[in-house]
Amino acid sequence: MNKTILICASFALATLGTSPTVVEAAGASEAQQSSASAKRQRQKQRVRTADSVERTTTATSRNGRTAERRVTRETDRDAGTRRTEREATGPRGRQASSESLTTRTDNGFTRNSTATGPNGGEWQRDVTGSYDEQTGYTRTQNTVRPNGDTVSRDSNRNWDPESQTGTRNVTRTGANGGTQTLDVNAARTEDGAARSATRTRANGDSVTRTQEVVVDKDDE
């Protein structure tokens, strides 16, 4: 399975799924490598204005090495946009950064993100999310890796309150074009709930897992 190193961040305006991970890796993982057993001091600072907030976290180890992470968010409520910038510097001076712009739409949002790792590699990610009363919540995510490979992830979640059933479908497409799918069906029953999930690999092999929860109301 082709996995994207990026993690997608609060999709609801969130982090660049992957970019926060790349950025935090420069500060967090390097700080741990500098002195795993050292007792560190951590300082946090927050500066807030009417339409922005900046958070700075500085960690200092017992040997005096420091790592810093800065996150800045600017929100334009009239335009329906939020810009997030992240910068991280590890104790050895390695740096990483990311920037994302989230825009509200009539039925969801779009997010365009870029992240630059400590070695200079650049990741790009575009995310689109939407909600429809009939089809539910749909999200499409395309990521371009530093080597030019493109991977994607499409997902849909839906819940029918009338029938008390829900579905979740996820399709991942790797850089070589292979796809993997996950199909989940859930339903409330008279005495609990039932759930089945089928995962299909790129080679066509599949595995299904079923679960059932029964509640004994007499014991409540």
Image (cartoon, grey):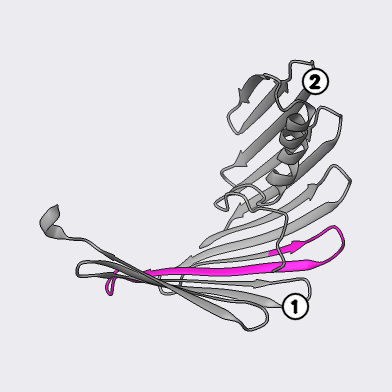
Q: Residue furthest bottom?
A: 204
Residue occupying the point 51% across, 70% down:
156
Task: Report, in whole angstroms, how far the alpha carbon at label 2 lies from the one at label 1.
Answer: 44 Å
Closer to the camera in the image, 52 or 172: 172
Identified at 67% across, 78% down, the residue is 202
Q: Which residue in the protein does label 1 denote?
A: 177
Instruction: Check disc 1 and give the amino acid type.
Output: Gly
Q: Taking the image as drawn, is residue 160 in sight?
A: no
Q: What is the magenta segment's predominant secondary structure?
A: strand
Q: Which residue is mark 2?
A: 65
Q: Is residue 119 visible?
A: yes
> What x and y, as percent, mark residue 113?
72, 52
Left or right, 26 with reference to 194: right
* Residue at image location 78% in from the left, 48% down from the top: 115
Residue at disc 1, secondary structure: loop
Span shown in magenta:
142-166
Mark 2 and 1 residues: CB-CB less than 8 Å, in contact?
A: no
Q: In the visual, does 84 lie left or right of 26?
A: left
The percent position of residue 39, horizontal first and vertical second, equals 67, 19
Mark 2 residue element: loop
Q: Position of residue 73 (x, y in %)?
A: 65, 37
Q: Is residue 214 left or right of residue 138?
A: left
Q: In the rendered image, which quarter is residue 154 located in?
A: bottom right
- As rendered, which of 60 and 123 lies closer to the eye? 60
Q: Amino acid at mark 2?
A: Arg
Mark identifier at residue 79: none
